[in-house]
Amino acid sequence: MSLFDRFEQAFMPNYGVPPVALARGEGTRVWDVDGRAYLDFIGGIAVTSLGHAHPALVEAVSSQVATLAHTSNLFLHEPEVLLAEKLLELLQAPGRVFLANSGTEANEAALKLAIKYGKRHGRTYFVAAENGFHGRTLGALSLTGKQAIRDQFGPFPVEVRFVPYGDADALKAAVTGECAAVFLEPTQGEAGVVPPPDGYLAAAREICDAAGALLVADEIQSAIGRTGHWFAHQADGCTPDILTLAKGLGGGLPIGACVGFGEAGTLFDKGDHGSTFGGNPVSCAAALAVLANVDLGHVRTVAARLRDGLEAIGHPLLKGVRGRGLWLGVVLTEPVSARVQKAAADAGFLVNALQPDAVRLAPPLVVTEQEIDAFVTAFPRILSEAAK
Ligand code: PLP
């Protein structure tokens, strides 16, 4: 029986059966179980910041696992302290950190902080964006504005009012003195890599300040250099009250972080929240290696090359390119992204059919100019193949 058939028999069908079975990787290159090579232009969904098997990540994780793999939160360890300090240094704002294992869990922590803030200040509801994605556990799902993945799982534990993403007037109307917090992605990832109009996040900051609500930036997909900045909000002239991180932070090891600034960093009392594995030494060592090795200058250079290269392609199936840095949505004129994903894999490139008319690109941040050129050169043929 093939690995695919065995997968189908052993697993719940929530993911379907993935089309490619990967065996190993090195840099931006991965090999499937049959030894076929691909250039990885999706990076485990914006996760493998340093590419596959980066020597610094391998060394950090191997030596940490051989030294001390786990302590629980009954004991502290140096890697977690170094990581929290490093994040705060990069954020250039005084704050406090909670470490979790995933993006969803980082958002659960943010929601619990916001609930405490609401109780303290007599605020009862939350605002989030239509089509936004914040995770699958019930708290994070309450904030997720995609009907298709919410519908069957309500009712939800908190009241969330949804507004169209990018519409500052709608946001202003929704955020009253009873709103505890607004949850936003600086660019909507799962919705199709959709950036808001310029000034939207700064407007959200002003709206929250005026109403006394917290602003929560979900940077689980957008941070750690992905947009050419450590954190996407830094380019938007807006500091959130709460920031959530995951994905690229661990470079492939599971870790999430929730950072609270000002009052939001002081809301949890002893015993209010916790996680057995959150902030474990191995994941912290991985995150420290990522933060020490991401080169923002390189990201900006190769990102510009990718975008310019794609925008120079004239093809009837290519409508345009949106997104920031090494995080792009390639928008199609027809809803055939699944065919583009398949044609790309056949041509030796891994991309992601994110929406019927949008293909996501999020290569490792170490992708080289030659690898970008190889993709840009192959893409017109991939599109033509998909259009057949
Ligand atoms: N928030 C955003 C913006 C995301 O893109 C994701 C995952 O795609 C999540 C939260 C959930 O993160 P995780 O899958 O690590 O739980």
Image (spheres, rainbow, N blue to C red):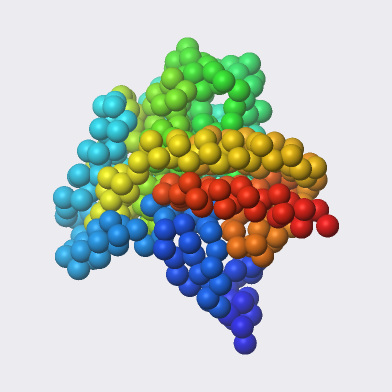
Residue at image point 48% right, 46% down = 369
Does 225 sit left or right of 127 as displayed? left
Quick one: quadrant of the N terminus? Answer: bottom right
Q: Position of residue 178 (x, y in %)?
A: 51, 21
Q: Nearer the viewer, residue 271 or 213?
A: 213
Residue at image point 60% right, 18% down = 168
Q: Is residue 109 above or below residue 351?
A: above
Q: Quadrant of residue 188?
A: top right
Quick one: quadrant of the C terminus? Answer: bottom right
Q: Nearer the viewer, residue 153 or 216?
A: 216
Q: Position of residue 278 (x, y in %)?
A: 32, 53
Q: Nearer the viewer, residue 387 or 381?
A: 381
Q: How many marks?
A: 0
Does 219 sit left or right of 41 as displayed? left
Q: Quadrant of residue 329?
A: top right
| Residue ranking furthest to the bottom | 1
| Residue ranking furthest to the top | 210
Residue at image point 53% right, 39% down = 305
Q: Position of residue 17 (x, y in %)?
A: 64, 69
